[in-house]
Structure formats: structure tokens, C-alpha cells
Image (cartoon, rainbow, N blue to C red):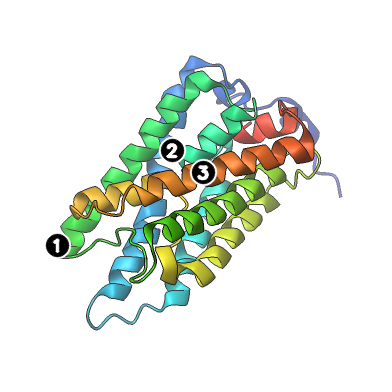
């Protein structure tokens, strides 16, 4: 059934917020950066907070709940803030889109800074809530797992995550709002099998904030190197699957339009 005026509303774009229709508009830049700060803050609170609570004495948080929470959070954030910033929430995602020529390089530093800031705010918030004695859900590799193996696990996980993100954004497989389910579902699924190994971070911003707040920096390099390697492999795979990039639909998804 047609809704009177619905077509006109779509054709009109966003008259109350025209910057939503023009990613190059400076008027919306602070809003996009703020969306990345808030989105990353909420993601890290869910991911690191769940891990910290499960480690706490007397906690009844299960591993399934711990790894499902960040997946559901990302799903909700894509639906809520996707039209504002594209909801990257992860430095390797912003760089991957830029390498695919689907996100302007000049915007990458601002997005990465916003994501790191969101992670730091989450780490500080968890420290206030849980105290200085807690690990605050900082990413750590399993006892007995070598550093090299930990890097490999994070690389494999991030390869899958970035492949899902780039794939669902491309015009060949663009699934619109269903991409929220794909990305959130992958994060939860990856956590279900890999959380005991490395914590299934896949995100330098998620690992950096809690690690700094907890002064637990020994394993941090793993969560910088592993996701970066995985992202580069995913971009290489996308090159093989879909060519050099510059896909118009993917650019719209990456930019929130």
C-alpha cells in the first residue's frame, strides 16, 4: 500500500539535515566524528565490560553473553548511527575502506582519532566503575598461546570481519540494513570460538583503551599488528574478488549516505 507523500520525502533527501546528503559538507564533520566517538565508546563498554565482569569474583556473566554483547551492540549502532558516520568504530575498517578508494584518506585521521578517543573514554569509565584492581577487560592472549599464534588468530578474525564489511557494502552484494545483522553476527560468532584464545578483539581501539586504563600493555602490540595484517589480507582478497574498488554503493555505505 502506498503512503501519501512517501516518495516525495525520499526524493527530498534530508531537508532538515542537508549535510547527511553531502559527505563533503563541513557542517556535518563534527557530527560524524562525534558519532564515531560515541559508537566506539558503547562498543568497548560492551566488549571490555562483559569480559571484565565475567572475570570478576562471583560474576554470573557467561562466555556466550560476553561475546554476544558486542555483536548486538554493533548491530544496533549500525542501525542507529549508520546514516551519520557509516559506523566504522574500528581503525582498520576506516583504513580498509580508504584502501578500496571508497572513503577519502583525508577523513581517516579524524575517524581513527575519534575511535581511539571512544576507546579511551570507555577504559576510563570502566576504571571508575570497577576500580584500579580490575583488568578492565583488557585484551590478553591465552596462557600457553605464543605471541605469533596470537597475532595469527587476530589476523584471521579480522580478515573475516573486514571481508564481511567490505562484501556487504559492495554493489555486488549490498544488503542495506541487513549488513547490520551480518557484521554483528560475525562478531558474535568469532567471539564464540576465539574468545578463549585472544579475546577476539579485531579492533585496536577496543584493545587500546582498556589496556591503557588498566596499565596492562604487555600484549597490546598483538592487537595492533594482528588486526592490521588481517585487514590488509581482506583488502587484497577484495581486490581479487571485485577489482580495485571505488564502488559507488560501498562508498555510500562507508560514508553513511
Numbered disc 1: secondary structure: loop
Q: Residue at x 77, y 32 (%)?
A: 243
**Residue 166, can we see it?**
yes
**Who comes first in sequence, dot 1 or dot 3?**
1
Q: Residue at x 34, y 39 (%)?
A: 116
Decide: few, some or many residues near mark 1? Use Cα within 10 Å; few <14, some 14-19, many ≥20. few
**Residue 85, can we see it?**
no
Q: Which residue is mark 1?
A: 131
**In the image as oriented, which residue stretches furthest toward the left?**
132
Decide: few, some or many residues near mark 2? Use Cα within 10 Å; few <14, some 14-19, many ≥20. many
What distance separates the C-alpha of mark 1 from that of mark 3? 34 Å
- Badge number at residue 54: none
Decide: few, some or many residues near mark 3? Use Cα within 10 Å; few <14, some 14-19, many ≥20. some
37 or 161, nearer to the observer: 161
In screen coordinates, is 130 left or right of 159? Answer: left
In screen coordinates, is 70 left or right of 128? Answer: right
Task: Verify CB contact (< 8 Å) between mark 1 and mark 2.
Answer: no
Numbered disc 2: secondary structure: helix
Q: Which residue is mark 2?
A: 36
Q: Which residue is mark 3?
A: 229
Image coords of residue 6 (percent x, y): 77, 37
What distance separates the C-alpha of mark 2 from that of mark 3? 23 Å
Task: Verify CB contact (< 8 Å) between mark 1 and mark 3.
Answer: no
Q: Quadrant of the C terminus?
A: top right
201 or 113, nearer to the observer: 201
Q: Residue at x 55, y 42 (%)?
A: 231
Give the label, 2 or 3, closer to the camera.
3
Image coords of residue 122 (percent x, y): 29, 50
Image coords of residue 119 (percent x, y): 33, 45
Amino acid at each position: 500500500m502506498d503512503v501519501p507523500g512517501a516518495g516525495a520525502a525520499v526524493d527530498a533527501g534530508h531537508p532538515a539535515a542537508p549535510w547527511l546528503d553531502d559527505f563533503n559538507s563541513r557542517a556535518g564533520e563534527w557530527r560524524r566524528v562525534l558519532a564515531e566517538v560515541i559508537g566506539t565508546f558503547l562498543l568497548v563498554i560492551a566488549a571490555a565490560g562483559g569480559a571484565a565482569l565475567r572475570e570478576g569474583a562471583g560474576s554470573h556473566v557467561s562466555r556466550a553473553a560476553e561475546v554476544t554483547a558486542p555483536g548486538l551492540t554493533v548491530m544496533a549502532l549500525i542501525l542507529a548511527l549508520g546514516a551519520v558516520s557509516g559506523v566504522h568504530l574500528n581503525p582498520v575498517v576506516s583504513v580498509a575502506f580508504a584502501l578500496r578508494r571508497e572513503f577519502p584518506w583525508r577523513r581517516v585521521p579524524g575517524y581513527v582519532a575519534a575511535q581511539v578517543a571512544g576507546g579511551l573514554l570507555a577504559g576510563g569509565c570502566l576504571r571508575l566503575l570497577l576500580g584500579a584492581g580490575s583488568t578492565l577487560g583488557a585484551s590478553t592472549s591465552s596462557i600457553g598461546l605464543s605471541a605469533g599464534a596470537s597475532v595469527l588468530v587476530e589476523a584471521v578474525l579480522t580478515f573475516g570481519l573486514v571481508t564481511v564489511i567490505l562484501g556487504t557494502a559492495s554493489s555486488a552484494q549490498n544488503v542495506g540494513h541487513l549488513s547490520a545483522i551480518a557484521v554483528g553476527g560475525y562478531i558474535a560468532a568469532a567471539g564464540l570460538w576465539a574468545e578463549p584464545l585472544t579475546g577476539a578483539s579485531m579492533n585496536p581501539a577496543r584493545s587500546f583503551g582498556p589496556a591503557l586504563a588498566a596499565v596492562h600493555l604487555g600484549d597490546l602490540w598483538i592487537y595492533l599488528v594482528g588486526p592490521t595484517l588481517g585487514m590488509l589480507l581482506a583488502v587484497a582478497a577484495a581486490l581479487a574478488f571485485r577489482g580495485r574498488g571505488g564502488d559507488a554503493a560501498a562508498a555510500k555505505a562507508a560514508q553513511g549516505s
